[in-house]
Structure formats: C-alpha cells, structure tokens
Image: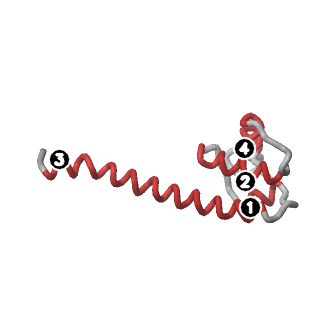
C-alpha cells in the first residue's frame, strides 16, 4: 500500500470523526441548556421548546425525553410512544411536524 492509498482510506474516517465530534459538541450544548430546565420546575412544554429545539433524530429523542421528564415531574415517566406523539404534535418547536400558528 502506498501513502496515497492509506490517505484515501483514512481521509473519510478523519472526516467522520470530525463530524461526530461536532455532533457531540452540539449535543453537549443542548444538554447544558436542558440542565437549566431542571432548575425551573414550573417549566411548561412550550417553554421547554425554547430551551431545546428537538426533532425526530435519535440523539434529540434523548434530549426530548429529558424535557418531558422535567415537564411531567419526578414521578411521571413517558413511554417512547408518548414521546413520539409529542414530537409529532410539535411541542418541541419542530416546524416540520407542528401545525401552523
């Protein structure tokens, strides 16, 4: 294998690592915002949307589940079906799924 062959194989991996690092940093920012939600127990679902603009992407579901846990209180647990319905209903500010206001 030549250096060019190795670079051809490694370049996409380096790009993917950079993309994943950026995604993790973005997710970290969202979780930091989510932590501020936990300090405000009176947070409404619409207020939670202002802290975290969630979509149906897998990583965002974890954030959305955390927001729903805050909104529902410490004794309320939400199923993945309830979470999916909430996302489709647009309570997290997703313009793709929310009805126009």
- Other residues around mark 3 within 10 Å, as few (<14) / some (14–19) / many (≥20): few
Question: Which mark is on residue 87?
Answer: 4
Residue, far left: 2
Disc 2 from disc 3: Cα separation: 46 Å
Neighbour class for label 4 at 10 Å: few (<14), some, many (≥20)?
Answer: many
Does 34 sit above or below residue 58?
below
- At 73% from the left and 65% from the top, the residue drawn is 36
Q: Secondary structure at mark 4?
A: helix
Cβ–Cβ under 8 Å for marks 3 and 4: no
Q: Is residue 29 left or right of residue 5?
A: right
State the SS at label 2: loop
**Are discs 1 and 2 less than 8 Å apart at CB?**
yes
Query: CB under 8 Å between callouts 2 and 3?
Result: no
Q: Which residue is mark 3?
A: 5
Tell me if 55 is positioned left or right of 49 in this view: left
In terms of sequence position, does the residue under pointer 1 or pointer 2 come before the other? 1
């Amino acid at each position: 294998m030549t250096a060019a062959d190795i670079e051809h194989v490694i370049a996409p991996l380096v790009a993917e690592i950079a993309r994943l690092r950026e995604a993790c940093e973005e997710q970290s920012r969202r979780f930091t915002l989510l932590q501020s939600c936990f300090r405000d127990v009176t947070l409404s679902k619409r207020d939670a949307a202002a802290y975290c603009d969630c979509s149906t992407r897998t990583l965002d579901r974890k954030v959305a589940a955390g927001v729903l846990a805050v909104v529902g209180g410490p004794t309320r647990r939400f199923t993945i079906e309830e979470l999916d319905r909430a996302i489709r209903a647009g309570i997290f500010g997703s313009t793709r799924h929310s009805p126009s206001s």
